[in-house]
């Protein structure tokens, strides 16, 4: 198995991952596993986990794995598409996201993510398609990598 970057990522968490409380236990080229504890900011008005949280943690995990793979080639990645299906509702507890690559080409990668509850029941599934960017390419007006 490739190097696990989870510890380094958790020390540098910022932005969305930090605000949502998402941390990683595994972050390799082949597997990414993250967890968060459901809190009030994760719920929609019916008191269940908001679908956007499922989309977001799937994208975060898939993007992390794709980035680990891309960095080895001097590339970075940016998401192009996220398709998430909601399977089961949750209200509380620790939820886990697991992501694995489906395909990793020169220009794009596709990763699949699954969100589960503490009993291992599937809450959501999704696929994220990512574009591989060469270092120094501008993204939103600033150079990447």
Image (cartoon, rainbow, N blue to C red):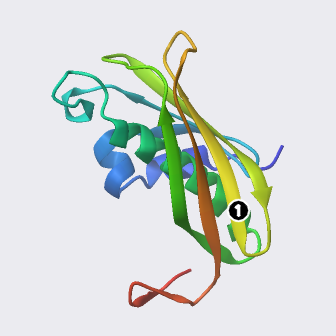
Picture mark count = 1
Q: Residue furthest top?
A: 119
- Give percent across and percent down for residue 24: 53, 39
Q: How many neighbours does mark 1 have within 10 angstroms: few (below 14), some (14-19), or many (20 or more)? A: many
| Residue 26 visible at all | no
- Give percent across and percent down for residue 116: 53, 23
With 71 as the anchor, is 80 left or right in this view?
A: left
Name the residue rendered at 35%, 43% in the picture: 52
- Give percent across and percent down for residue 18: 34, 47
Name the residue rendered at 50%, 13% in the picture: 118
Name the residue rendered at 32%, 16% in the picture: 92
Q: Residue furthest left?
A: 45
Residue nearest the viewer, comparing 8 with 71? 71
Give the SS element for disc 1. Answer: strand
Residue nearest the viewer, comparing 83 with 12? 83
Determine whether 55 is above or below 35 in the image. Answer: below
Q: Using the rendered view, name the quadrant where residue 53 is placed.
A: top left
Q: Which residue is mark 1?
A: 109
Q: For the C terminus, give its image quadrant.
A: bottom right
Name the residue rendered at 57%, 90% in the picture: 136
| Residue 49 visible at all | yes
Determine whether 130 is above or below 113 in the image. Answer: below
With 72 as the anchor, is 137 left or right in this view?
A: left
- Give percent across and percent down for residue 14: 36, 56
Determine whether 144 is above or below 92 in the image. Answer: below
With 145 as the anchor, is 44 left or right in this view?
A: left
């Amino acid at each position: 198995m490739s190097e696990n970057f989870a510890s380094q990522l958790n020390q540098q968490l910022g932005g969305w991952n930090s605000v949502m409380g998402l941390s990683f236990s595994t972050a390799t080229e082949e597997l990414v596993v993250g967890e968060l504890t459901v809190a009030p900011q994760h719920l929609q008005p019916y008191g269940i986990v908001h679908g956007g949280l499922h989309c977001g943690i799937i994208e975060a995990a898939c993007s992390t794995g794709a980035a680990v793979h891309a960095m080895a080639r001097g590339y970075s990645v940016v998401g192009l598409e996220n398709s998430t299906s909601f399977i089961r509702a949750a209200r509380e507890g620790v939820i886990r996201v697991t992501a694995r690559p489906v395909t990793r080409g020169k220009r794009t990668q596709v990763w699949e993510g699954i969100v589960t509850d503490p009993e291992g029941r599937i809450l959501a599934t999704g696929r994220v398609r990512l574009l591989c960017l060469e270092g120094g390419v501008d993204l939103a007006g600033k150079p990447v990598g």
